């Protein structure tokens, strides 16, 4: 019997490099890291059942990559070799690494 309380998820922030190292990207059939939001929809739905789909989404202060197959403000999807833990909320900061690369040029 449930006590009526909702268990708070663990929260993990990752840089893009940490994300790629931890989960390992699967290229789309087109050879791109990001999967097209419409072209491979059926395959994305299947992989989402295995906790291997991540959504690149626009938020108020930029963009973020989070676990799961989301629709609102989505820009694209990533598929990974290793599944994410569904009891954890992930926040992958893609912009942090882009900014560092621009500063180092």
Image (cartoon, rainbow, N blue to C red):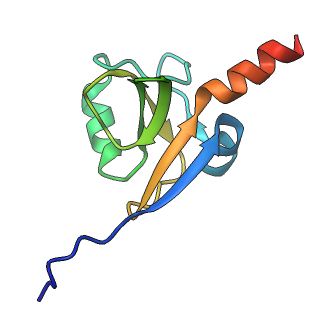
Q: Residue at x 28, y 17 (%)?
A: 38
Residue 19 drawn at (x, y percent): 62, 43
103 vs 62, left or right, is: right
Quadrant containing the C terminus is: top right
Q: Which one is nearer the viewer's eye here, 29 or 58?
A: 58
Most extreme residue toward the left, as rendered? Answer: 1
- Identify the image quadrant of residue 60: top left
Most extreme residue toward the bottom, as rendered? Answer: 1
Q: Residue at x 83, y 15 (%)?
A: 103
- Identify the image quadrant of residue 100: top right
Most extreme residue toward the front, as rendered? Answer: 61
Q: Residue at x 48, y 23 (%)?
A: 61
Q: Residue at x 47, y 22 (%)?
A: 29
Q: Which one is nearer the viewer's eye here, 5 or 76?
A: 5
| Residue 20 against residue 41 in the figure, above or below | below
Most extreme residue toward the right, as rendered? Answer: 104
| Residue 53 against residue 98 in the figure, above or below | below
Quadrant containing the N terminus is: bottom left
103 vs 29, left or right, is: right
Residue 46 drawn at (x, y percent): 28, 42
Residue 65 drawn at (x, y percent): 48, 34
103 vs 45, left or right, is: right
Q: Which one is nearer the viewer's eye here, 24 or 10?
A: 10
40 vs 104, left or right, is: left
Task: Tally the marks.
Answer: 0
């Amino acid at each position: 019997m449930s006590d009526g309380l909702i268990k708070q998820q663990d929260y993990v922030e990752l840089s893009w490099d940490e994300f790629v190292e931890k989960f390992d990207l699967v290229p789309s059939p087109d050879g791109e890291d990001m999967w097209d939001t419409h072209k491979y929809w059926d395959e994305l739905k299947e992989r989402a059942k295995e906790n291997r789909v991540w959504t690149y989404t626009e938020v108020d202060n930029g963009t973020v990559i989070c676990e799961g197959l989301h629709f609102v403000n989505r820009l694209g999807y990533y598929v990974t070799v290793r599944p994410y833990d569904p009891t954890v909320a992930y926040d992958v900061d893609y912009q942090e690494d882009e900014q560092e690369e621009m500063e180092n040029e």
